[in-house]
Amino acid sequence: MSDVAKPPQSRWNDRLPPDRAWKGRSGRTRKALSVEQDKAAGGRHRREVDLGDGRVAHASVSLRVLPKTRRIRASLRWGDGRKSPERYLGEVEHDSREANLAEGWRLAWAKGLLREETLPEGSTASTPAVRASMQGNRGRDTKPEKALRSLLFKEGLRYRVNAPPVRGLRRSADVLFPKARVAVFVDGCFWHVCPEHHRPATKNKDFWAEKFAENQRRDAETNRILEEAGWTVIRAWEHEAPEEVARRVISAVRRATG
């Protein structure tokens, strides 16, 4: 008897594939489903179907199991405003839905069914992926900010959100404690030049170098103005663990309020 492991699909010859290999969790929002597809495709900019006449649609990969064959079939679906076309891509055989969706997208590209989003005229982004990253960097109420605020609230701390620490200063702190005079900024890795995750631009280098340098100068100036006015400034990167940032903030606030 051979010791060589059989491919995953061969284990399903006498039973249906496990739900984890093809079925998504019930009750998910449309946004969550879209995020799942974006991740599997390698970005939203890689989900476009050319409808002709300058029109495009964003497609999705669907997974189904045929009870008779006990195989997972991947298909590409999209809407053109009148109907929802579907193209069969092939069988997939991985043990997780995530891997099978990614395989479905690879098959769709191999069949020439997709096109990559093109940059609009005048865009300063170097690639569609960079543009998507720029659009995804929200100015306020980001997930890291919300996670931090939730932890602070559970500790009984009350604060203001997106408020200017100093009157007349047109700069807002993400979380503000007026009484303790503590201002918290949760900085995005892209715009504020995180030393761990920021990557220099490969196109429009001079433009982006000046843009990022200006952001850094502005951050340093904000720190100086607030500290000279008697404020404690806490800056955290969006990639930092919310629990660690919360500990720093709680310590600073309690020191200031006794």
Image (spheres, rainbow, N blue to C red):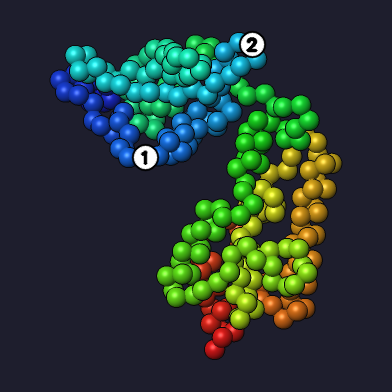
Disc 2 packing (10 Å; few <14; some 14–19; many ≥20): few
Sequence order check, earlier mark of 2 and 1: 1
| Disc nearest the viewer among 2 and 1 | 2
| SS assignment at label 2 | loop
- Give the image location of residue 79, x and y in percent: 48, 19
- Give the image location of residue 234, x and y in percent: 63, 70
Residue shown at the point (23%, 26%) measured from the top left: 17
Would residue 236 appear left or right of 221 to someone viewing this image? left
Q: Is residue 229 visible?
A: yes
- Give the image location of residue 203, x and y in percent: 77, 34
Q: Nearer the viewer, residue 219 or 31?
A: 31
Q: Answer with the quarter of the image where residue 23 lies.
A: top left
| SS assignment at label 1 | loop
Q: Is residue 110 visible?
A: no
Q: Nearer the viewer, residue 125 or 195?
A: 125
Quadrant of the drawing holding the C terminus: bottom right
**Residue type at the position of mark 2:** Asp
Residue 186: mark: none
Would residue 132 appear left or right of 167 to someone viewing this image? left
Residue shown at the point (83%, 48%) measured from the top left: 210
Disc 1 packing (10 Å; few <14; some 14–19; many ≥20): few
Residue 28: mark: 1
Q: Is residue 128 above or below residue 107?
A: below
Residue shown at the point (41%, 27%) measured from the top left: 101
Q: Is residue 153 above or below residue 131?
A: below
**Residue type at the position of mark 1:** Arg
- Give the image location of residue 171, x and y in percent: 73, 63
Would residue 225 appear left or right of 66 to someone viewing this image? right
Q: Answer with the quarter of the image where residue 107 lies.
A: top left
- Give the residue number, with chain letter if any, for mark 2: 53
